[in-house]
Image: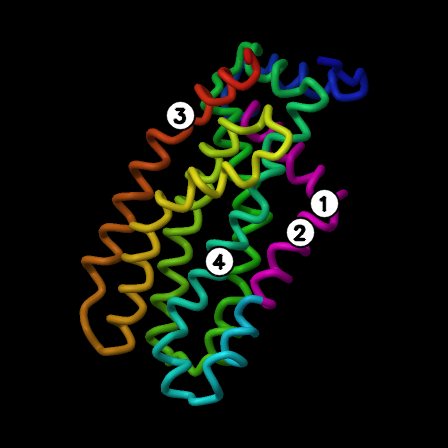
Amino acid sequence: MTIKRASLPPLLEAASLPPLSQGFGALLRRDLLLASRQRSDLIYPVFFFFMVVSLFPLGIGPDGKLLAKTAPGILWIAALLSTLLATDSLFRQDYDDGTLEILLSSPQSSFVFVTAKVLAHWLVASLPLLLFAPLIAVMLHLDGRGIGILLASLALGTPILSLISAIGASLTVGLRRGSMLVALIALPLYVPVLIFAVGAVETATLGGSVAGHIGYLAAMLVLAVTLAPFAIAAGLAISVKA
């Protein structure tokens, strides 16, 4: 495996910072800077989200009541697929240039490195969707309460999707065509998030209480943030040694 010399100094500098907060911040800024230089990483998820959502009304018709009824599922499926679209490149560049091996062997905890990578992925791939979701929801005739619960479900659910996707990406980063395997690994694990998130929005539009749905999403987020980084770090270690 070859290592580009240009990438070594900032990485070694980030890895040698004693405080975890400084190392986390350095790695997060690095990934966001790299994403800003690759405009496609910023544009493709949002463009794909708009494209998927715009196709559904063409297929099911212009009926406002029908669109409002199907809007939660449409928006969440589009968000799910957009997150999955940006997953394959999560660790790919770092693996190809040798950065991943350096970070895994650095004094910093793998938990810090993995969390910074996943947070950068969420900020690039999912945060823009939260910003544009209200506009799309209005186009699909979703009411005000439904839009509020939709944003809450996206804020809680999309980080879970990013963490689950990162697990699949960590196990397939060494494969040339790992994107299909990532989908096979991640999609079954997406199902509980999809069920509770869509259920929360549908219940809100019917005037019911969504505390149970939001509570389950929050519990899954806490569980994912606690356990997923260790699974991701273990998967990366296996992929690097393979």
> Pointer 4: residues within 10 angstroms few (<14), some, or many (20+)?
many
Q: Which residue is mark 2?
A: 42
Give me the C-alpha separation between circle 4 and circle 2. 14 Å
The kind of residue on which mark 2 rests is Leu
Give me the C-alpha separation between circle 3 and circle 4. 23 Å
For image coordinates 52% across by 33% down, the residue present is: 169
Q: Which residue is mark 4?
A: 79
Q: Are marks 4 and 2 in contact (CB under 8 Å)?
A: no
Give me the C-alpha separation between circle 2 and circle 3. 26 Å
Q: Which residue is mark 3?
A: 231
State whether the magenta stretch is mostly helix, strand or loop.
Answer: helix
Q: Can you tell which of label 2 and label 3 is closer to the viewer?
A: 3
Give me the C-alpha separation between circle 1 and circle 3. 28 Å
Q: Is residue 147 or residue 4 the one in the foreground?
A: 4
Instruction: Provide the residue span drawn in magenta.
Output: 23-51
Q: As drawn, which residue projects farthest toward the right?
A: 6
For image coordinates 52% across by 45% down, the residue present is: 122
Q: Can you tell which of label 1 and label 2 is closer to the viewer?
A: 2
Q: Are marks 1 and 2 in contact (CB under 8 Å)?
A: yes
Decide which of tag 1 and tag 3 comes sooner along the chain: 1
User: Image check: 203 left or right of 74?
Assistant: left
Q: Secondary structure at mark 4?
A: helix
Q: Which residue is mark 1?
A: 36
- The answer to whether residue 46 is magenta is yes
- The answer to whether residue 113 is magenta is no
**Where, by quadrant of the figure, is residue 207 drawn?**
bottom left
Q: Secondary structure at mark 2?
A: helix
Residue 1 x, y percent position in the rendering: 71, 13
